[in-house]
Amino acid sequence: MIIAVDFDDTLFRYVPPKDGSIDYSGRPDSIGEPIHKWINWCHDKKLEGHQLILWTCREGAALEHAVAACRSVGLEFDAINENLRRPDESLYWPDCRKVKADIYLDDKAAEAR
């Protein structure tokens, strides 16, 4: 199974700037506390043999900080914002922002507490 996992407010809390503005520039301090419920779930799925895609709008420095945060809790991904193909699939799935997965884990769909 392929599982696409969002980063902000799913794996780690997003911390907005102190002035209340919206800032997606990749501030290192934009990454807050880890959300262990979902991190542990991802670890369990990897141990079961499933593949994980880090599926996030972050790019550049912001993405690098997110990947480093995931690694700091022992979470490694099979792909980052890219499609994976199962060995038994004959269809070509291009790399695009809309990744193909069996499960999408996102704070907008799952209560990340």
Image: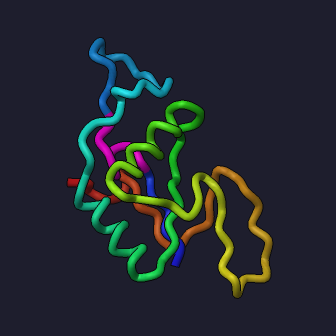
**Exactly how many numbered labels are in the figure?**
0
Looking at the image, the residue that sits furthest to the bottom is 88
Please identify the dominant SS of the magenta region. Answer: loop
Relative to the observer, which residue lies in front, 102 or 58?
A: 58
Q: Is residue 82 left or right of residue 102?
A: right
Which residue is drawn at the image coordinates 35% and 48% (left, top)? 72
Which residue is drawn at the image coordinates 51% and 79% (left, top)? 1
Bounds of the magenta span?
Answer: 7-14
Looking at the image, the residue that sits furthest to the top is 19
Please, is residue 110 above or below residue 25 in the view?
Answer: below
Which residue is drawn at the image coordinates 31% and 68% (left, top)? 41
Q: Please say which color scheme the image uses.
A: rainbow
The image position of residue 73, as x and y in percent, is 32, 53
The image position of residue 52, as x and y in percent, is 50, 66
Please, is residue 42 above or below residue 70 in the view?
Answer: below
The image position of residue 93, as x and y in percent, is 75, 67
Q: Is residue 3 left or right of residue 86?
A: left
- The reply to whether the magenta stretch includes residue 13 is yes
The image position of residue 33, as x and y in percent, is 24, 41
Relative to the observer, which residue lies in front, 47 or 57?
A: 47
Which residue is drawn at the image coordinates 41% and 51% (left, top)? 71
- The reply to whether the magenta stretch includes residue 104 is no
Looking at the image, the residue that sits furthest to the left is 113
Q: Is residue 81 left or right of residue 41?
A: right
Please, is residue 20 above or below residue 50 in the view?
Answer: above
Query: In the rendered image, which quarter contains the C terminus?
Result: bottom left
